Image (spheres, coloured by chain):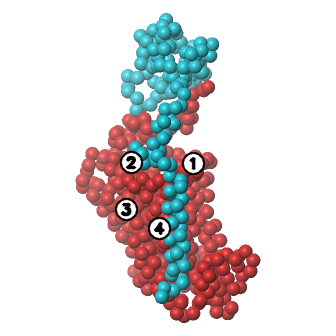
Amino acid sequence: MIPPQIWRPLGILLAILLIYLGVRSFFVPATFYQYGHFRGNSLATIASRPVQYAGKKACMDCHDTIGEKPYHSKHKTVSCETCHGPSLGHVEDPSQLPSLKPTNKEWCARCHEANNARPKTFPQVVIARHYPDKDCMICHNSKKLEKKP
Amino acid sequence: MAPNINPAMMEALQHVKGYIFPNELELQWGILIVIYPYLTGLVAGAFILASLNRVFHIRQIEPIYRLSLLTALAFLVIAPLPLLFHLGHPERALEVIITPHLTSPMAMFGFVYAWYLMVVLLLEIWYDFRADIVGFSKTKTGWLGMVYRILTLGFMDTSEKSLAVDDKMGRIITIIGIPSAILLHGYVGFIFGSIKANPWWGTVLMPVIFIFSAIVSGIALMLVLYVVTGRARNTPIKTECMDAMGKFLFYALVFDFALESLDWFHRFYEAEESIDILVLLVSGKLLFSLVGVQLILGTLIPLTTLGLTQVLEIPKKPRKIMYFWSAILILIGIFAVRWNVVIGGQLFSKSFAGFTTYKPDLIGRESLLVGSILLIMPFIILWVLTRFLPPWRGVGKEISHSS
């Protein structure tokens, strides 16, 4: 006969294992393994979220004169909403202005802070040492966004 | 809305040398991931030292056998915390257990950990302390007595026959426990060793080096704890126990050092394209922590000191002092090993053309403060455990027999 000091702790371990399996069957979402190692329904959840971005084309419908300036400049690959923020709300209701109108230098630093990982031909400066008390736009013309002083 | 630019990253950019990829600027694994393998290593090391007594009948280290088991438990309880702090979102922590991904070594940790905690350590401690628990359940009252009574699992027999069953079960679990302890820490080494994109980590020797450094750190920790607890309890510190631990510590360190050297010989002889950046890493960014702390302070000095105790007839008192301070240096050295592996592997660019930098924060979720708390907590838990289940031989049994 198996002594109690063997089957009792082993019984507790077995009970923990069974509880684990029970908890698992309860907590694993029904669609979890549907497409892979994630909840299948999450695709529908993500797809159902409201669209935020309008796209450059929608901006150009009205702002073709402004839009064309950066289009021919060095910022031509940068979409309007990269700096002005998601603007579908503005497209649908023009009185609702885009969320961002960046003018401070931290904004420029996002792309132009010196970083060895960036291509050498890419314009970059150490912002903290580059006219530290002046805003970028004072010298770099904000209309063309490319002009060098 | 101002753009979210991390000032620490702007600062770090100034310390980049050469060319690095954009995602290499900020280290993904910081001080907490250094502490994590350090803690699991101490768990595995303390357990393997305990098993020397249990399985291989090394009687000299009997005085620290039960303390080693409690130490392993105290450190194992804290071991996942650095990961939790590092990842954040503790509410998601159990998802690796609920929906485990079988190809993720990190997810498998949950099972290795659960196996080691539940099947090995708790069971072994239960069998080893069962007679004491029964004794305390008869003498203690109130909620503490209730806890002891629950822990007896309703089995109060402490006859010679039933104690023999305890002993046999403890032995069987230890035999299962040795490969489990190796699995626990070998797997931590595997997490690094399996990353073949990183030449500092990606070597098959990594799990083996981790295991041996774990054994070294575990023995060193137990040696220090034996002296400290002995002093605190005002009990004599047995020279034969210190001698045995000192001997094991010396040979484990020799083996560990040989393995690490072998790894370096291998790297130099292979001289793969990464060797230049690794040499620059060791002679530059890691010069202090690898050559200074890990090699000289944590390996060569203790090797010499412990080596002297093995070949010279040194009087007892200075010999014990030499063991103690060698163990302290080894504990610092093994911490440097973990630092050099985890941080060192992220300091150089995978383009092999540049270095980034790392300076841990003083306060914050992933900081020196949290790291220090996580390193101190196991000792507090150990103190509580030793109050609850005194590991000093005979304390519980006397109560058991007298009741």
User: Residue B66: in sight, yes or no?
Assistant: no
Q: CB atoms at circles 1 and 3 under 8 Å apart?
A: no
- In front: mark 4 or mark 2? 4
Give the SS element for disc 1: loop
Q: Position of residue B223 (x, y in %)?
A: 52, 75
Residues B1 and B150: in front is: B150
Q: Residue at x 45, y 55 (%)?
A: B100
Q: CA distance from mark 1 to mark 3?
A: 29 Å
Residue at mark 4 shares a chain with residue at mark 2? yes
For residue B132, which quarter of the picture? Answer: bottom right
**Residue B281, labelled with which disc?**
2
Q: Is residue B33 above or below residue B302?
A: above
Which residue bears the numbered disc 3?
Answer: B207
User: Mark 1 Cα within 10 Å, few/some/many (few <14, many 20+)?
Assistant: few
Chain ID, cyan in image: A
Q: Are marks 3 and 4 on the same chain?
A: yes
**Residue B89: numbered disc:** 1
Q: CA distance from mark 2 to mark 1?
A: 34 Å
Query: Which residue was labeled with disc 4?
Result: B115
Q: Mark 2 and mark 3, same subunit?
A: yes
CA gap, disc 4 to disc 2?
A: 38 Å
Horizontally, is B391 left or right of B282 in the view?
A: right
CA–CA distance between discs 2 and 3? 22 Å
Q: Is residue A57 visible?
A: yes
What secondary structure is marked by label 2?
Answer: helix
Q: Quadrant of the N terminus of chain B?
A: top right
Same subunit under labels 1 and 4?
Answer: yes
- Quarter of the image with the C terminus of chain B in it: bottom right
Q: Residue at x 57, y 68 (%)?
A: B74
Rendered position, B85 above or below B329: above
Circle 2: residue type: Leu
Q: Nearer the viewer, residue A83 or B294?
A: A83
